[in-house]
Image: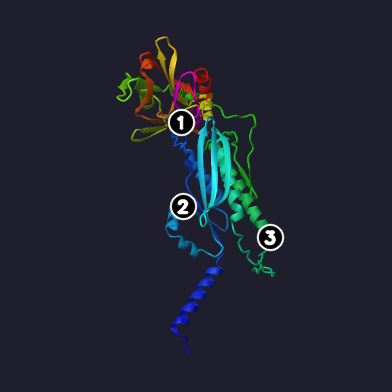
Amino acid sequence: MKPNLPMRKILSIIIFISILSARSPYTYVYLLPFENIQNDPAVEWIAGGLTDMVHQELKNHLGLRMKTKEDLEIIMNDRSLMMNQPRGSRNVLILGKFNRQLDKVHVSIQMVDVATWEELGVRKIMEVYTQIPSLNKAVGTTVNQMITPYIPSQPVAKVSPFPAFSEPKVEVKRHSVSLESEKVVSNLDQQIAELEASMDVLLGARVRKKDQPKKEVPRFDAGEWTMDFDVDRKLEDNPENAANTQMLSAVLDQLLTNPYDVELQRPEFEYHKDDELYMTVRFPVIYKLKDKIIKDMLGTLPYTGLEQNGTLSIFYFDKNSFNFPKKHVELIKSGAFRIIPVIRILDQNRNTLIVVADTPDSYWHTKTSNKVLYVPQHQFSPLIDFAIGGWSMQVAMETVEIQAVYEFILPVADVESLSNVSVKFVNENELKSFLDPLL
């Protein structure tokens, strides 16, 4: 007798549940882009490297499936989708945040169970700003350590106790007479070829090749590559690049020390209708790259490549045409070229009354002063950046104007004493020694 319709449905459900139960569980990791909590454009590029390093560390784990922000949105809109996952699976969210304080980058990592929103772990990492590769590696290793305890073990394939069957190889042996005959024929051919070459040289039909110096050619032998080399031989600068290098050095001197033009505009004053004792003062300042630098880059230097996208221009240089000056290479690699504007407003006696430090660094935004009116701001952003490797250099420049307005509320008596405004670019490494005497 055939089972009725309800019984068929019950059997189908049982079979479906059995199939789900037989599947191996997974840990689904939802990896979101690391958040730049200060929205600092100078360090925004770090976010992509941190996320990529975590992805590289986790992607090869058995029992782990990487998910994106879009996957998280889908499962949050319909949490019942987690019921379709293999029994014993987990859904884990990785949240990362970072910010820069002086010459340090601070990264915090949080791991959350998506099903219960329970926090599974928190880690904090700090590294020097100039050691981003070390920071990326530390973040990837840390997340790997955090997630490993939550990855389910995978079933081990059974190993057969019997040896694997293989077809016996039949070795065909050649007769010794055949081998010796082949050697004799080969030697005769070689001797005849050498005799013909000598006769051609004597008759003038061929010129004997002069001995060339031996090249350092790698040798391959049984899975090992070897090459003879001279330990005293060093990679030296190409003398033919001296002229191009001199032009590059002159341009880099300006780009790394004084690349900006500043336009100071007359201050604006606004009286307060509700309080005649106070007044709002605005100091407009315009920042832009020097036109001469851009013209020199476009018209003088024989750059290797140029990429332009709107107001952004990226110049490429390589060692085929340039010898990179060591002084400039060290400045770029260490990040010592970064500068920020400091605005000082003075009275008639050249005494500083107001100090504005236009920096994204949160350290200076927590500072106060009893001597002057100290106003930390973040309106200026670098319009130039550098990247350098072993063989190439890149210079990125943005041809835009930054229109900053620094605004203060002052007593009317203090406003009458304002006489002069000064803008000075200060190297980030020297900012503390510059501001401490003023504050």
Residue lying farthest to the bottom in this orientation: 1
Residue at the spot of label 3: 177
> Residue placed at 43% from the left, 35% from the top?
41
Measured Cα–Cα span from mark 3 to mark 2: 70 Å
Residue at the spot of label 2: 68
Q: Amino acid at mark 3?
A: Val
- Which range of residues does the magenta coloring cover? 356-375
Which numbered dot is residue 360?
Answer: 1
Local crowd size for mark 3, using a 10 Å CA cut-off: few (<14), some (14–19), many (≥20): few
Measured Cα–Cα span from mark 1 to mark 2: 30 Å
Q: Is residue 18 above or below residue 306?
A: below
> Residue placed at 38% from the left, 21% from the top?
410
Residue 362 among those drawn in magenta: yes
Q: Which one is closest to the eye, mark 3 or mark 2? A: 2
Q: Amino acid at mark 2?
A: Thr
Q: Give the mark nearest the N terminus, 3 or 2.
A: 2
Report the side of 47 relative to 176 (left or right).
left
Label 1 close to label 2 by CB (< 8 Å) = no
Q: Amino acid at mark 1?
A: Pro
Between residue 333 and residue 405, name the one nearer to us. 405
> Residue placed at 59% from the left, 59% from the top?
152
Q: Please state the horizontal and vertical placement of residue 78, each as a whole percent of the image.
A: 43, 60
Between residue 258 and residue 146, name the one nearer to us. 146
Q: Secondary structure at mark 1?
A: loop
Q: Secondary structure at mark 3?
A: helix
Q: Please state the horizontal and vertical placement of residue 258, each as a whole percent of the image.
A: 43, 21
